[in-house]
Image: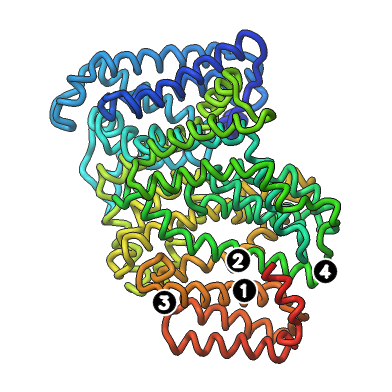
Amino acid sequence: MFKELLGMYHKAGSRRKYEGNMNLLVMSIAVIMSIYQIWEVTLGAFTPIRHMSIHLTFILVLTFLIYSFTKGRGTKMPGVVDIICIVAVLFAGIYFNLNMERIVTRNPMVDPLSTLDMLAGSIFVVASFEAARRTLGGPITYVAAAFIMYMAFGHLVPGGLWHRQMSFMDQIDQMSFTFNGIWGSPMAVASTFVFLFVLFGSFLSKSGCGDFFFDIANAVAGGTTGGGAKVAVVSSGLFGMISGSPTANAVTTGAFTIPMNKKLGYTPVFAAAIEAVAATGGSIMPPIMGSSAFLMAEVAGIPYVKICIAAAIPAVLYYVSLLAMVHFEALKSDLKPMDRDMIPPVWKVLKNGWQYSIPIVVLVWSLLSGHSPSMTAIYGIVTVIIISWFKKSSRMYLKDIAEALGDGAKSSIQVTTACAAAGMVVAGIMSTGLGGKITSVILGLTQGMLLPTLIMVAIICLILGMGMPVAAAYVLTAMLAVPAMLQLGVSLMAAHLFVVYFSIISAITPPVAVAAYACAGIADCDPSVTGWQASKLGLAAFLVPFMFVYNETLLFEGTFFDIGLSIILGSLGVIALAAGVQGHAFNKLNLIQRLAAFAGGLLLIDSGYITDIAGIAMIAGVLITSGGFKQKKNISNMAA
């Protein structure tokens, strides 16, 4: 019986699909929440905790209305447990706001909490914990529970992990009444930047921008070798600029690209895997890099626009490596371009959808002009509404605007519940001094050497990312592992981007490759095999973070000449790595040529002149011995 209950609790709840009055109720709450968020950014002046408590109350109410307790139970209408949770959350939210002046002026961990303080704080902790489980499944709640248990019982742990005993009141105080718990950096980001950019994406999707991205990718890449798969790569990269979620990106663009590539001759596994890797890369593509980049701005204290600039070249290298993988696979399997009748002319696509580029331009202009990310998102939303009226078919009327407002609020549920759970993890780290202890452990295991430390941090990110959302995986790893990287001389920007990068690509890393599994469902193929294929296709991309740690000119640090040279050598390196993995460049490669191509690509990771010359020499040797210089047609085709 207990095992059965544990198995049920491990799974996330089902998402209810309402009709009639219940759908109207849920949509009304979601629309009101979005309107409140816009008002708070533009006209409001609430204290951070007041705003975050209102935001979280809205999200928790929507969660208990939309997500059932577990799959197969209460999937049609809210049950007694859901109603109790909603009433409790409303009590906690109202109590916090009625007592906000006292809450923000008290001395945390010094002034005692009242009984009602304890009750309201406990409700937020338990409700956030349960909401994270319903929306994201068991793993993230297990991690949060482990840190809560460490807060409670860490004083019983012998050795270096011991910490002073904390009372139950201190634990609730830390998690619910300070900026080191639920109301910490993750929630601050989720309730401002992330929510508004998710809302922007909802408006852009409602206006028909997704079709434009697919059409432009089709027009540009469809006629090249491996055109169908390249369309998946380009369209996912474009859509990822506004999506920021690997799984959402994969499902949205994969619905078109996966069936198309199956028809063109790609195996279902390859079609699903290439879409998964391409969709995951969208989360590192500026100007919208998903919740982890906004969190990085908050945690690292680096302006978001600087993060976008620094992330641009690594994002390009990611997609260069993926396009190379696709191209070599197409040559190896003799896969042809798409039929001409399937490819729209570029001029026609631009004529019909040029206006969709305006919101992206507005975003970039606003960020570069120094506006806050929140106001940038607002400008983007207003721009989308305006440009929707350029064409009769895309006009957004009040009904469409209301649907976009509601869909945006509902789409932000998972990232907010993940950030609430991450806040509990932060509380466990900050209140016990665990971060410094883990840093000592990491440096002790790696003997203070940079490469082993980077590998260990990457493995930690990938493991945490298998069971946790990107935002939570980033926060946890940043708190525990980034200090070790900083002590070894890695810059603040490079260290945090390294963690962001690996937290994101955990979505294609088995055994829990969520983006690959989502694509496998569309392709109707084995999820496990798809996950391993995705890892293979993304292997060259896995090395990009090591490249910018060892060569920070890839983060736009240095002279224009040095940056330009690094881009060229970095692109050459990831293409060589792709050739080594695929066993094919412009012709089939034998084992020695594959190893030489792979080694040449690895040598270009280091920014030293000797390693660069050696890497170029090895790659040139592979081209000469495989007849690559004779394949001008293929070279020009790949560039296309």
Name the amino acid, label 3: Phe
Going by the numbered disc 4, the residue's amino acid type is Ser
Q: Would you say 555 lies left or right of 630 here?
A: left
Is disc 4 placed on a helix, strand or loop? helix
Find the distance from the CA under tag 1 to the CA under tag 2: 7 Å
Residue occupied by mark 3: 561
Whether residues under marks 1 and 2 lie with C-beta atoms below 8 angstroms apart, the answer is yes
**First-in-chain label (4 vs 1):** 4
Circle 2 residues within 10 Å: few <14, some 14–19, many ≥20: many
Q: Residue 418, position in %: x, y?
A: 46, 37
Q: Earlier in the sequence, mark 2 or mark 3?
A: 2
**Quadrant position of the C terminus in the picture:** bottom right
Inter-mark Cα distance, 4 to 3: 38 Å
- Say which of 16 and 634 sits in front: 634
- Asked whether, in this view, residue 3 is left or right of residue 367, the answer is right
- Front tag of 4 and 3: 3
The relative height of residue 159 versus residue 123 in the rendered view (above or below) is below
Quick one: label 1, few (<14), some, or many (20+) residues within 10 Å?
Answer: many
Residue 220 appears anywhere in the view: yes
- Percent coordinates x, y for residue 58 in the rendering: 44, 21
Amino acid found under the numbered disc labelled 2: Val
Mark 4 and mark 3 lie on one chain; the one further toward the N terminus is 4
Q: Which residue is mark 2?
A: 320
Colour option used: rainbow
Identify the residue at image location x=65%, y=30%: 394
Report the residue marked by disc 1: 575
Task: Indicate the position of residue 78 as horizontal and vertical percent values.
Answer: 58, 14
Q: Quadrant of the N terminus?
A: top right
